Image (cartoon, grey):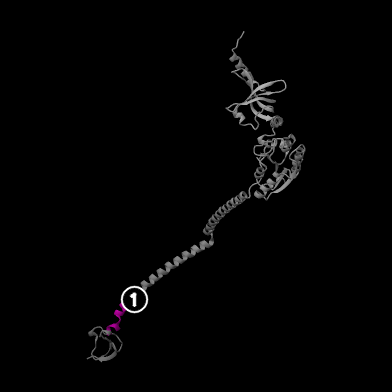
Amino acid sequence: MEIYSVTEALYYLKIKLDCDEHLSDLWMQGEVSGCSRTASGHYFFSLKDGTGQMSCVLFKPAAMRQAHLPRDGSNYIMHGRMDVYETNGRLQFYVDQIQPDGVGRLHLEFEALKQRLEAEGLFAVERKRPLPVRPRTIGIVTSPTAAAFQDILNVLGRRYPLAHLILSPTQVQGEAAPPQIVRALAALNQLAEVEVIIVARGGGSLEDLWAFNDERVARAIFASRIPVVTGVGHEVDYTIVDFVSDLRAPTPSAAAELVAPHLDELRDEVHSLADRVYIALQNKLDEERSGLESINRRLILSSPAARIAAIRRRMEELKERNSMHLNHSLELRQARVSSLASRLKVLNPNQILERGYAIVSREADGRVITDAGEIIAGETLQVRVKNGTFGVKTV
């Protein structure tokens, strides 16, 4: 026979409780009694029904997260785990969530539907579609009298007045709301021009928002061929449609901001595109200009006109060189002629006469007498001097 100590038995019981998937993730319903709060902020109480009761503890960290704290005589639905307190061997329910009984039932339904739809793949991230960057037509599913509709109109009118808006009206609260929301979505899906849909409702209690936790609405959003943005409730509110939609916005106004760009962004984008186009054109012009200059240089090099011009320049150079050569030759000849003329001038008989000499010649034949021995006595001679000629007779 195996004998356990009390501690060992309690430890064994604790392991069993921790391993039980139902007792470690348990929802329990009942009425609170004997509730007390310690100075450290922990709550101890019992949860009972008509025939039994369970000791419960709500520690301070979990208590600080609750919207509703336990009060004697009130009915609640609580979530937590079963465990054993080893010091006194007491079985206790360790609470981490508290909902009033009515709201708690809705919360349980919410969690059950959420888990089922998630298992079917309706929340899969990979199926979510991107929104159009600049939608021309935006569909809106909401109540035409709701403040949420006016908020959407104000935001879109300020940010993106270029868009065409189509309201598909519906109730957003009550039992009639879910089928109306489904029909409103279907009506927009029949319009080819609609590029994105906003499903919106203002804030409210869980009961007020319950139409957006309806399975029919969730499946209608999943089946929409058009991307859907949800803006239901306030920032802290989550509904089933938020998980199914392509994008969840915290408020209706935020949904309008998400589906449409701001005009300033469009202006900046246009300016940026204009700058890029200008730079691209400038680069293209520079490239073409460079190409044309290269072709022009090649044409100039291969053009007959260029060759003729080159030949003409060569001819001009040769002409100039020939002219210079001729001028130089002419100058040399002129210098030579001048030199000869000077020499001739020196040798010119007339120049001798200028210096007082005379030229003697025979009168008969005009022969110049160059030697005295040639003179014959009695003959007539002609004597030529500077200013004339006169005759002499020899003796």
The N terminus, quarter of image: top right
- Is residue 128 a member of the stretch shown in magenta? no
- Is residue 346 a member of the stretch shown in magenta? yes
Task: Report the residue at 30% width, 84% height from top.
Answer: 350
Pinpoint residue 34: horizontal percent, then vertical percent. Answer: 65, 24
Pinpoint residue 223: horizontal percent, then vertical percent. Answer: 73, 37
Magenta-highlighted stretch: main secondary structure? helix
Nearer-the-camera pick, 391 or 303: 303
Callout count? 1
Horizontal side, residue 137 vs residue 85: left or right = right
Q: Give the range drawn in magenta.
A: 342-353
Pinpoint residue 263: horizontal percent, then vertical percent. Answer: 63, 50
Residue 25 lies in quadrant: top right
Looking at the image, residue 323 lies above or below residue 122: below
Of all residues, the one furthest to the top in this rendering is 1
Task: Report the residue at 61% width, 14% height from top.
Answer: 9
Q: Name the residue under label 1.
A: 338
Residue 35 lies in quadrant: top right
Look at the image and tell me whether residue 337 can be seen.
Answer: yes
Task: Report the residue at 30% width, 81% height from top.
Answer: 348
Looking at the image, residue 239 lies above or below residue 73: below
The C terminus, quarter of image: bottom left
Check disc 1 and give the amino acid type.
Ser
The crowd level at tag 1 (other Cα within 10 Å; few <14, some 14-19, many 20+) is few
Nearer-the-camera pick, 113 or 125: 113
Pinpoint residue 96: horizontal percent, then vertical percent. Answer: 63, 27
Nearer-the-camera pick, 349 or 47: 47
Classify mark 1: helix, strand or loop: helix
Look at the image and tell me whether residue 27 can be seen.
Answer: no
